[in-house]
Image (cartoon, rainbow, N blue to C red):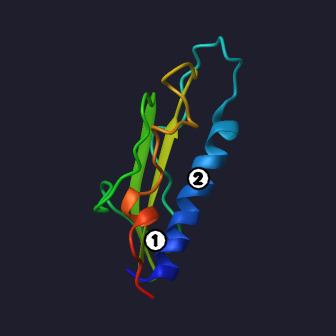
Amino acid sequence: MHVKLRQTMLVIVAIVLLISGPIFTTSPRSSATVFPITALPELPGCVKAAAWNAPWKPEFSGVDRELQSSYQCDGYKFHVYLAQYFIQNQGKEAVSQANHAIPKSWRYGRTQA
């Protein structure tokens, strides 16, 4: 996979992860309101796969709900992963060393130009 495309996909996944919490949290912490979205949207001009079809997957521990899918847009594949925590507590946190948005090999391995 080209480095530029990999970086673009990583940015898309990171943006979805970062904005998902504030956007979908519509109730106070003590409320038992359920996350309202049960599927990722269809994107105009893109074909949505039936399931995640990348050879890697983000790893988040203690997630209450995960949404994930792969898309094909203009000849490019990209993958979207959304992790939702209804209430965070020790061992069940969005920001944790136990969570990995990208494979370790991408962070520490070699990349080809």
User: What kind of element bears circle 2?
Assistant: helix
Left or right relative to 74: residue 12: right
Which residue is denoted by mark 1 in the rendering? 46
Asked which quadrant contains residue 95, the reply is top right
Q: Is residue 93 above or below residue 68?
A: above
Residue at point 33%, 61% (across, down)? 49
Taking the view exactly as shown, the residue that stands out farthest to the bottom is 113
Residue at point 58%, 23% (across, down)? 88
Q: Residues within 10 Å of mark 1 (few under 14, many from 20)?
A: some
Q: Amino acid at mark 2?
A: Val
Q: Which image quadrant: the C terminus?
A: bottom left
User: Which of the two discs, 2 and 1, labels the residue nearer the N terminus?
Assistant: 2
Residue at point 33%, 55% (across, down)? 52
Front residue of 48/61: it is 61
Exactly how many numbered labels are in the figure?
2
Front residue of 12/109: it is 109
Residue 74, how many percent across, how many down? 46, 82
Q: Residues within 10 Å of mark 2 (few under 14, many from 20)?
A: some
Front residue of 31/9: it is 9
Left or right relative to 98: residue 18: right
Q: Is residue 91 above or below residue 10?
A: above
Residue at point 43%, 44% (across, down)? 67
Residue 90, how many percent across, how many down? 53, 19
Residue 93, how many percent across, how many down? 55, 29
Tag nearer the camera, 2 or 1: 2
Q: Which image quadrant: the N terminus?
A: bottom left
Kindly identify which numbered label has been placed on residue 67: none
Q: Amino acid at mark 1?
A: Cys
The Cα–Cα distance between marks 2 and 1, rounded to whole angstroms, is: 17 Å
Kindly identify which numbered label has been placed on residue 16: 2
Asked which quadrant contains residue 33, the reply is top right
Q: Is residue 24 above or below residue 72?
A: above
